[in-house]
Image (tube, rainbow, N blue to C red):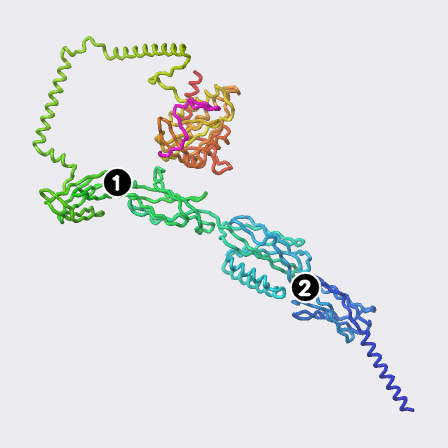
Amino acid sequence: MKKGIYVLSLFVIATFVFVFSVVNLVSAEIHFSKPEGIYNLGDVIENEISVVPPGKGFLHVDLVCDNGELNILNTIPNDNGKANVKLPLTNTYIGDLTGSCSFLGEYNGEVSESRSFEISRKLDVVLDIDSFSAKPGENITITGSVTRQNGAKVNGKVELTVPLLSLRGDEEIEEENQSEENTSEEEGNEVDEEKEESDEDAEEEIIEEGIDNGIFYGNIIEGRFSIIFDLMENTPAGTYLIKVFAYEEYSGERTSEGIGKSDLHVLQILSGVDVALNNQNLNPGEIFSFKPMALDQTGVSIESEISAIIIDENQNRVFEKIVRSGETIEYEIPTNLTSGYYEIEVSSEEESIIKKFYVNEMAIASFELQNSTLVVTNIGNIPYKKDIQVDLNGKPFVKKLNLNLGESTEFKLTGAEGEYDVKVSDGESEISRSGILLTGRAIGVQEIKEGANIALNRPVVWIFLIIILGGGAFFLVRSMRKKKSFAHSDIGKPSLKERIKNRLNRRKQEKILNLGKKQETEKKYGVKVSEDKEERKEPAMVKNDSVDLIVPNQAEPVLVLRGRKNFVAMIALKIKNKITKKGKSNLEKSIDHVYEKKAAVYDKGDYVFIIFSPIMTRSLKNEIIAVKTAEKIKLLLEHQNNRESDEHKIEFGIGIASGEVVNKVENKILKFTALGNLTTIAKKLATASNREILINKTAYERTQGVIRADKTSNNEIYVIKRILDRERNDKFLKGFLQRMKK
């Protein structure tokens, strides 16, 4: 009986244990709410955990990631079996855990894992433009967007770095782009980290070398940023890397971050010119080598066309050529080039530079043997006052020479008939010839032009000259005596004064008679008879609808193929209203004085052009003459306007420009071809003027010290305020006003 009771007890206990174990096994469960697919540092993960059955022990939850795990929860679920996880994704809470993660829970011996999700530290940085092109000194704006991996907009900060001297070649850029395309998403973070580390190392090296990397800062607002920076004027041309580093902060710590990259193409621009001279002190006949160069913003030579002009002290061009930048030019200095300072001007587009060099004085002679005649010519740039030695078969003959520029002399070489070795030298130049055939009684060197002087030393020549002079004196005395005889006396003849008076009366009568015949012919046949050619011609009339001036000294703008190239000063007078006949008369009076300055005038449309050329004025200071003349014209026009009624007033503008022309005087007319835009500049100045005198920069620089002028908003134009030499103007104006009153 007892044994049965014992067995039954054991069976009940075993059944209870089995049932309890089965109940625990079946009913202990852990359920996690569904997490988001991806989280960034700075986000907060919230997850609700349900356990079954409740009240059976502790709930232990770990965050398990690829690079480690972290316990985040140890708690007893509430009566409903619920527990909440609220995990801020910051370095303080999770350290450096990133990558593919999940929650791993343990409750009452049961272990369960949540759905996996990703924790990322990466932000997506996208620049609006993949590459930029800019010139040195320009303003650049970089804009873009920053988002988290889950697409959420970011509010944070951004740093833009331009390693200005870390130039990258095109091949490097292509290789880098290709490697980025081939990199998988899983390896992307590692590649980015390695690039960031290498970039940071490169930046550290650059900073250690003292190079400005150009770091600029900005804010990210609602996922957008914009940074503005200026390129330095001397930024070298090339392709640069722009790196934009974006990040978020939480409690002073950086959480998520990302990098965006772009390329900046800095263009090569012309910023200056230079010229390298092989020598600044040259002798005639030497080779003058120089190398014109067009320079970019860093002083590096660039490919460009460049002009080189050599000018003498009188502004005459002795050499000019257009070459490629960096090309070496060789110019042989002519042996007769005048000694003095010369300027070489090198220019490309708006950039130019002038350097000076000096050509020395040098006496140079050329020796030429023409059969038995030696010709010596001065081909240097100063008179040739030297001795030359002529050797005939070794026998020396020394001759003193005094030759002006370009002058030649000849020597006759003589000797017993035969062939001779001839050598001519002055210590610097020398020629030698063999087999020169000479004839004569004795060996010698005789200057050919000295023959006349030698003849004068002979007595026979002197006797012959005395006979000729004596005969001439005899006939002269005889002629004078004959004029004083009674048969040839002037008694009864009219005096010189009477003869002149009679001649004038005859001409007057002939003129009256011709005038009567002319009027009779015109009346009879109804045609106009041209005046006698001997009568004085009236000044030429330049016809124009607006101005119509009488011009004693004419100028004519035509194509001049052969003429002199000169710097001239040009006054342009713009008539801005329709003037009356009296206004035209006043206009002519106001410019009448320009003819005293040897100026040439022509008018076209509403413009009157007054040209001061050196071939007429015989002066190189024509800009000064033009300024003073323009001032007189202005004063006279203003005086006349003050005296006249409104209908006779003249609205005007005056401009002065200076430039080069090719000109010549033909039939007492100055014919010229303006080089460049000289006439256009003068017209624009006159049009812009309002009863004032405007002058361009070239003319202003050639009148410095004579005038005072203010620079306008256009740096190439000046307004004349004062002429320092006013005494002559005042004297002229005073005399003119007195004449007007009379």
Tell me residue 189's x, y (percent). Answer: 61, 64
Hey, which quadrant is residue 113 in on the image?
Answer: bottom right
Which residue position holds label 1? 382
Q: Is residue 152 visible?
A: yes
Q: Quadrant of the N terminus?
A: bottom right
Image-based side of 616 in relation to 208, left or right: left
Under mark 2, the amino acid is Thr
Q: How many marks?
A: 2
Location of residue 734 in the rendering, given as x and y in whole percent from the top left corner: 42, 22
Density class for disc 1 (Cα within 10 Å; few <14, some 14-19, many ≥20) is: many
Q: Earlier in the sequence, mark 1 or mark 2?
A: 2
The residue positioned 80% from the left and 76% from the top of the image is 25
Q: Is residue 552 magenta?
A: yes
Q: Say the numbered circle drawn on residue 90.
A: 2
Percent across and percent down for residue 188 are 61, 64
**Magenta residue span:** 541-562
Residue 625 placement: quadrant:
top left
